[in-house]
Image (tube, grey):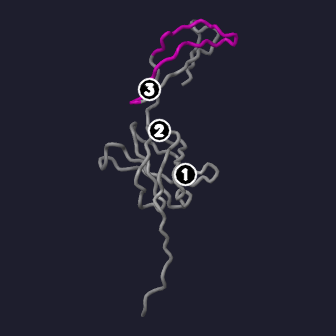
């Protein structure tokens, strides 16, 4: 006996992640996520995985993995974000399903906001289209602050039968 014939084996550089989009997503998951980085991401195959690890809690919560698929048109990895509790997560990529590249990017999971009150709760209908605009509200989701614009979608926002729909 001799040794078996040599098998082919390839080395590739670790991909370096540069961004995820969108960076903020609902905790319910199932939202498309694009992961961008260096060229080796294009080498991804059926073993490609995207890992979500809770930031600041190494080892206390197991990471969650999902399949990543190369999107040549957008030049990024596509995946569906998993359902996770609210908070910051590090996103890392493995091209072989085992080793994850160092240097992750971050994503923020949030619970859906609910508006308990709007001030002012009544504004004059000043637009010919029958919609009324009011000044901006401020909403806080974890450490994220965002300005919101809201519209009352009826001719008379102060009427008792009027339903106010808010755009965020």
- The disc placed on residue 117 is none
Residue displayed at 39% across by 30% down? 143
Can I make out residue 159 in this image?
no
**Residue 88 x %, y %:** 39, 39
- Residue assigned mark 2: 28
Q: Quadrant of residue 122?
A: top right
From the viewer's perspective, is residue 151 above or below residue 7? above
Q: Residues within 10 Å of mark 2 (few under 14, many from 20)?
A: some
> In front of the other: label 2 or label 3?
3
Q: Is residue 98 magenta?
A: no
Question: Which residue is outermost to the bottom?
Answer: 1
**Residue 165 x %, y %:** 57, 19
Distance from the alpha carbon under mark 2 to that under mark 1: 21 Å
Residue displayed at 51% across by 10% down? 121
For marks 2 and 1, the one nearer the N-term is: 2
Residue displayed at 42% across by 61% down? 98
Quadrant of the image containing the N terminus: bottom left
**Residue 22 x %, y %:** 52, 39
Question: Which residue is outermost to the right?
Answer: 128
Distance from the alpha carbon under mark 1 to that under mark 3: 28 Å
Residue displayed at 47% across by 68% down? 11
The front one of 163 and 120 is 120
Q: Is residue 141 magenta?
A: yes
Can I make out residue 26 in this image?
yes
> In front of the other: label 2 or label 1?
1
- Residue assigned mark 3: 145
The front one of 71 and 105 is 105
- Residue assigned mark 1: 77
Quadrant of the image containing the C terminus: top right
At mark 2, the secondary structure is loop
**Magenta extent:** 117-143
For marks 1 and 3, the one nearer the N-term is: 1
């Amino acid at each position: 006996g001799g040794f078996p014939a040599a098998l082919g084996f390839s080395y590739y550089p670790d991909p370096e992640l540069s961004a995820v989009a969108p960076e903020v997503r609902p905790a319910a998951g199932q939202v498309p996520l694009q992961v961008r980085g260096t060229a080796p991401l294009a080498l991804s195959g059926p073993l490609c995985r995207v890992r979500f690890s809770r930031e600041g809690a190494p080892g206390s919560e197991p990471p969650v993995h999902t399949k990543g698929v190369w999107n040549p048109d957008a030049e990024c990895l596509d995946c569906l974000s998993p359902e996770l509790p609210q908070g910051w997560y590090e996103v890392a990529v493995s091209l072989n399903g085992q080793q994850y590249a160092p240097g992750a990017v971050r994503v923020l999971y949030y619970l859906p906001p609910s508006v308990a009150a709007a001030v002012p709760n009544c504004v004059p209908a000043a637009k010919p289209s029958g919609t009324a605009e009011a000044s901006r509200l401020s909403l806080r989701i974890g450490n994220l602050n965002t300005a919101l614009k809201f519209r009352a979608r009826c001719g008379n926002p102060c009427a008792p039968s009027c339903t106010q729909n808010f755009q965020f």
